[in-house]
Image (cartoon, rainbow, N blue to C red):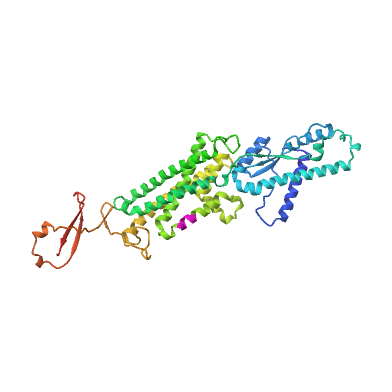
Amino acid sequence: MDHSKVSNDLVGIMLEKNEQERDRSVSPWVPQWKMFAHRRLHSLDECKEHVRKHEWGAIVINKGLQTRLQRALQQNIGYDSQKALTVLVSTGRNPIPVSRYFQPALDAMAQYASHQYAQRQLTTLTQQPFANNRNISIDNVDPAALITPIWYTTIDVSPYSFGIAPIAPLFAVFVSLACTLATQILIKLSSVELYDVVNHHQLAVALHLLMFIWSSILGLYSTLAFLAFRGPSYSSQHLGLPITGARFFAIFITFDAAILASSQWIFFWITILPPDLVPLSLISLMVPSSASSTVSLDLTPNGLRWIAAIPAHNSTMLFRTITSGAYPKVALNVGILVAEISFMFLVNLVIIMVRQDWLISGFVDAAGWYRSSIFYKQPPKYVARSDGLSRTATMSTDVSLSTALEEGPDINEMPSRHTINIMDDSETPEGMQFTLYGL
């Protein structure tokens, strides 16, 4: 922001250092520098807002640097070298790469520019002795301006540095999914009985409603746990934005959506896979979720950036934006979560109907083992009904002879066969009538 000779010298030092680092580096993921001279940024607050929304960090050359430095060299006016530069960093965008790559790179570049400028200034003053320079007198020079003319202060524009910040939202989702897993398995095992009394379309909607209620409960628990973890010293320690009622509700909705979307994914695989392959569904969900929530997509190869569509990634980004204000992509993250929930709702509608058909045909058993498995157990037979439901045909050992049989023709004249006819009469209290012939 200080358009002066000192500012130009500092920018030239930084860009020169950047070229040297880029030529020596063998990794394409080393942070690169660029000069940003935007005419719309007229104050440090505007620079903070720009970094918070769009950048990992920046080095700002403060206004009036050359004027303050010249006064310190010529008039011995008190000089604070830390006001020369301001290092801005956005921890809330992703605390792991910020602490691992960008914060060290910013500090190293600011220190390098400070040392290089100090050496150049001393060299210039040595070549032009104080006695021959009418503007600068050795008696009037502030030592701080002569020895360390440039230094910096660091400001975190989106504080997000509490202890478990890198894994806070991911940990909450994983703990909730662990509580969901038993429910999903129970739904799969009990669905055999539900198929017998509930229409499969209604069953699919009921199961999704159950998942939504359970996800909401777990989301509320996760939000309360996070709020309790931050404690009463939340604002005084500058750990992020204060938790208001609106932010509390936003965090709750974020956790709820992430848990629901992940639960739908687990439900799909648990429903369609045999029991011995169910752990693969957890691995396929947990590994990409862990990577997308902790590693920045800007530092991953292009072939792996599809993990941006994973629920855990979008919920983590929303969580960071809500609690720190960094890198707001709310519309994109919410849109992906809503699309995933809607898509998996339709997929699970189909998979529930497919599982019912497989059970009726005997392709799978109640536990989910396929017919080719050695653990397969023949499921109960189903009788189709006109209303779309099904009744299980079972035979009781306590069967009495029908009156029609006693008053019928001579048994010896009937063909020798054993037949059980099953009639479904919903008007009778018994529901199922057995008539035994050919005794």
Task: Measuring from the top left, give residue 36's x and y in whole percent.
Answer: 69, 43
In the foreground, 165 or 300: 165
Was residue 19 drawn as part of the magenta stretch in this picture? Answer: no
Counting the numbered discs, the total is: 0
Does 161 sit left or right of 107 as displayed?
Answer: left
Q: Residue at x 24, y 58 (%)?
A: 394
Q: Quadrant of the C terminus?
A: bottom left
In the foreground, 420 or 40: 420
Q: Which residues are magenta?
A: 279-284
Task: Measuring from the top left, give residue 396's x and y in whole percent.
Answer: 21, 58
Task: Measuring from the top left, give residue 278's x and y in whole percent.
Answer: 43, 57
Q: Is residue 437 above or below residue 1?
A: below
Q: Quadrant of the N terminus?
A: top right
For the stretch drawn in magenta, the main secondary structure is helix
In the picture, residue 157 is in which quadrant? Answer: top right
Asked whether the viewer can see residue 17, the reply is yes
Q: Is residue 85 above or below residue 274?
A: above
Asked whether the viewer can see residue 343, the reply is no
Q: Residue at x 39, y 47 (%)?
A: 208
Was residue 282 drawn as part of the magenta stretch in this picture? Answer: yes
Q: Residue furthest right?
A: 132
Task: Measuring from the top left, give residue 185's x and y in whole percent.
Answer: 39, 53
Q: Residue at x 45, y 44 (%)?
A: 218
Does 383 sit left or right of 164 as displayed?
Answer: left
